[in-house]
Image (cartoon, grey):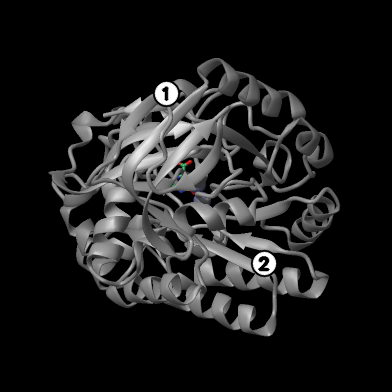
C-alpha cells in the first residue's frame, strides 16, 4: 500500500519546506523533493501538508448521551476538522471509571475506524470525588490519562492519592480547575458584563485556586500534572512561575479563550455558555502571550457537543459547552498565525507535537518513520463558519458567521484517507 503526496508545502518542527511525502504501509517512508512512485497520488500543489492534529480533550458522549454525539459522529467531525487522534473525557453514562468502559470505547473506535481515539479514565468512581477509580486496570485497557473533567476533585487528599497512583502507572492527571463552592452557581465570568446582564458571575479565583492547588501537589510530590482549559490571565501567571521553578506542569487552552471575551454574553446566546467561562480582554491577551512563550503547551477544543434542547433554554439552565472540533484549526490559524502572532510551525507544536508529547501518544510530526497521520489544508480559502454544515451532532458554537481561513482538504490516518473535502 503506497500513497504519494506531491508538490505541497510541508510544515515541519523547524519550519516550512516544499517536498513530497511517500507513504508505505501506513508510515511516512520518505520525505524529499521530486519523489517518483507508481501509486495513488494526492496533488497538494498550493496546499500545506501538516501533521494530523491531536486533540487531547474532547467529549464524544458515548456511552449514554448519544443524542448529543456518539463515537461515529464525533469521529467523522474530528477527521473533517483535520484531527487524526483525539482523547475523550470520561463524563459519559456510565462514567468511564473502569476497564470495561475503556475497552468499549476502544472497540467502538475499531468499528468506526476513522480517527484514533484514546480514552481518558475518571479519577474517581462516578466522578463523585470520593473513592478512586480502577486506575491501573483502566491504564492496562488503554486509558492514556485520568481526569474528572467537568469538575475538580474537591478533596485534596483524594487528588494527592490519585496523582501518586496514576504516576505509578505512568499516566497523568488532567485537571479541570474549578472550586465549586466559590463558583456557587455562576454561569459567566464575574465582572462588568455579569453585572450588566444580571447573569451570575464566577470569579477568576474559582479557577486559579484549583490551578494553584494542583501545582502545589505536583511540586510537593514531584509528579507531573496537566491543567485543562486555562481561561484566566492570573492562571497563566501561576503556571508561568511554576514552570520557572521547574515544576512539571503542562497546560492547555481553547480557541474560545484566545478569541472571545465576555462581551459576547450580552447577546444572551446560550452558545456562549462554557465552563470555564470566556473572560475579559486582559485574559485573552495573556493567553496568547502564554501560547507564544510556551507557558501554555497545547491548544485543545474541549469539544462539548450538546443537543438543541440543552441549549434552547434560559441562560442559567443551558448546558455548558462549545462544539469545537470542526472550527479549531481555521480559528487558530486565522487568529494566531494569519494575525502574525505565531508561526504555522509553532501552531502545529500546539495542536500536534505537544499533545502527543504530554500524553506520550507518539506521532505529532512529519518525519520519516512516523505514522502517516497527515492533514492537507488550503490556507488561502476564506469561508464563513456555519454550524448548520457541522458534521458533529452538536451545532452549539458562538463562532457562527466568523470569517476564517484554512480549509481542511483531506485527512489521512495511518496513510488512509479518512476525510476528503
Ligand atoms: O463547557 C464545558 N462542557 N466544560 C466542561 O468542563 C464540561 C463540558 C461538557 O461535558 O459539556
Ligand atoms: Zn473541563
Ligand atoms: Zn472538557
> In the image, what residue occupies the spot 57% across and 51% down?
151
Q: Secondary structure at mark 1?
A: loop
Residue 92 drawn above or below residue 212: above
Residue 292 lies, in percent from the top left, at 42, 74
- In-front residue for pair 131/60: 60
> In the image, what residue occupies the spot 62% across and 73% down?
212
Residue 280 drawn above or below residue 228: below
Q: Please indicate whether residue 366 sits to the left or right of residue 392 in the image.
A: right
Residue 37 lies, in percent from the top left, at 43, 30
Q: Please indicate whether residue 30 sits to the left or right of residue 143 in the image.
A: left
Badge 2 density bin: few <14, some 14–19, many ≥20, Cα 10 Å: many
- Tally the marks: 2
Residue 129 drawn above or below residue 86: below
* Circle on res. 267: none
- Of mark 1 and mark 2, the one earlier in the sequence is 1
Disc 1 marks which residue?
39
Task: Quadrant for the C terminus, please.
Answer: top left
Mark 1 or mark 2, whichever is nearer to me: 1
Q: In which quadrant of the rendered view does residue 174 lie?
A: bottom right
> In the image, what residue occupies the spot 63% across and 79% down?
242
Q: Can you see residue 150?
A: yes
Q: Secondary structure at mark 2?
A: helix
Q: CA distance from mark 1 to mark 2?
A: 51 Å
Badge 1 density bin: few <14, some 14–19, many ≥20, Cα 10 Å: few
Disc 2 marks which residue?
214
> For the residue with label 2, is its CB less than 8 Å from the closest atom of ligand 2?
no
Q: Please indicate whether residue 98 sits to the left or right of residue 43 in the image.
A: right
Amino acid at each position: 500500500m503506497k500513497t504519494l503526496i506531491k508538490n505541497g508545502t510541508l510544515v515541519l518542527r523547524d519550519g516550512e519546506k516544499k517536498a513530497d511525502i511517500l507513504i508505505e504501509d501506513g508510515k511516512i517512508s520518505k520525505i524529499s523533493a521530486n519523489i517518483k512512485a507508481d501509486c495513488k497520488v494526492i496533488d497538494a500543489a498550493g496546499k500545506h501538508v501538516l501533521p494530523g492534529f491531536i486533540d487531547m480533550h474532547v467529549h464524544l458522549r458515548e456511552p449514554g448521551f448519544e443524542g448529543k454525539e456518539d463515537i461515529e459522529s464525533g469521529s467523522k467531525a474530528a477527521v473533517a476538522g483535520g484531527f487524526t487522534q483525539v482523547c475523550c473525557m470520561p463524563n459519559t453514562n456510565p462514567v468511564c471509571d473502569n476497564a470495561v468502559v475503556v475497552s468499549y470505547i476502544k472497540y467502538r473506535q475499531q468499528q468506526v475506524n476513522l480517527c484514533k481515539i484514546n480514552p481518558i479514565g475518571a479519577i474517581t468512581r462516578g466522578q463523585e470525588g470520593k473513592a478512586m477509580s480502577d486506575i491501573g486496570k483502566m491504564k492496562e485497557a488503554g486509558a492514556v490519562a485520568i481526569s474528572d473533567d467537568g469538575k475538580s476533585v474537591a478533596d485534596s487528599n483524594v487528588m494527592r492519592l490519585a496523582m501518586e497512583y496514576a504516576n505509578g502507572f505512568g499516566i497523568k492527571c488532567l485537571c479541570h480547575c474549578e472550586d465549586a463552592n466559590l463558583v456557587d452557581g455562576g454561569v459567566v465570568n464575574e465582572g462588568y458584563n455579569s453585572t450588566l446582564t444580571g447573569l451570575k458571575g464566577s470569579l477568576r479565583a474559582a479557577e486559579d485556586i484549583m490551578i494553584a492547588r494542583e501545582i502545589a501537589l505536583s511540586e510537593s510530590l514531584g509528579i507531573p500534572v496537566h491543567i485543562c482549559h486555562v481561561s484566566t490571565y492570573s492562571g497563566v501567571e501561576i503556571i508561568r512561575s511554576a514552570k520557572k521553578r521547574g515544576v512539571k506542569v503542562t497546560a492547555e487552552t481553547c480557541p474560545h479563550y484566545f478569541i472571545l471575551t465576555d462581551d459576547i454574553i450580552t447577546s444572551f446566546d446560550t452558545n456562549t455558555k462554557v465552563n470555564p467561562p470566556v473572560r475579559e480582554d486582559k485574559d485573552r491577551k495573556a493567553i496568547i502571550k502564554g501560547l507564544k512563550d510556551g507557558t501554555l503547551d497545547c491548544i485543545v477544543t474541549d469539544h462539548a457537543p450538546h443537543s438543541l434542547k440543552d441549549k434552547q433554554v434560559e441562560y442559567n439552565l443551558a448546558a455548558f459547552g462549545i462544539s469545537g472540533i470542526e472550527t479549531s484549526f481555521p480559528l487558530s490559524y486565522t487568529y494566531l498565525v494569519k494575525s502574525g502572532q505565531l508561526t504555522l510551525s509553532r501552531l502545529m507544536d500546539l495542536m500536534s507535537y505537544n499533545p502527543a508529547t504530554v500524553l506520550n501518544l507518539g506521532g505529532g510530526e512529519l518525519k520519516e518513520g512516523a505514522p502517516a497521520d497527515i492533514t492537507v489544508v488550503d490556507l488561502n480559502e476564506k469561508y464563513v463558519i456555519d454550524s448548520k454544515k457541522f458534521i458533529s451532532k452538536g451545532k452549539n458554537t458562538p463562532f457562527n458567521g466568523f470569517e476564517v481561513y484554512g480549509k481542511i482538504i483531506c485527512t489521512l490516518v495511518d496513510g488512509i484517507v479518512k476525510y476528503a473535502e
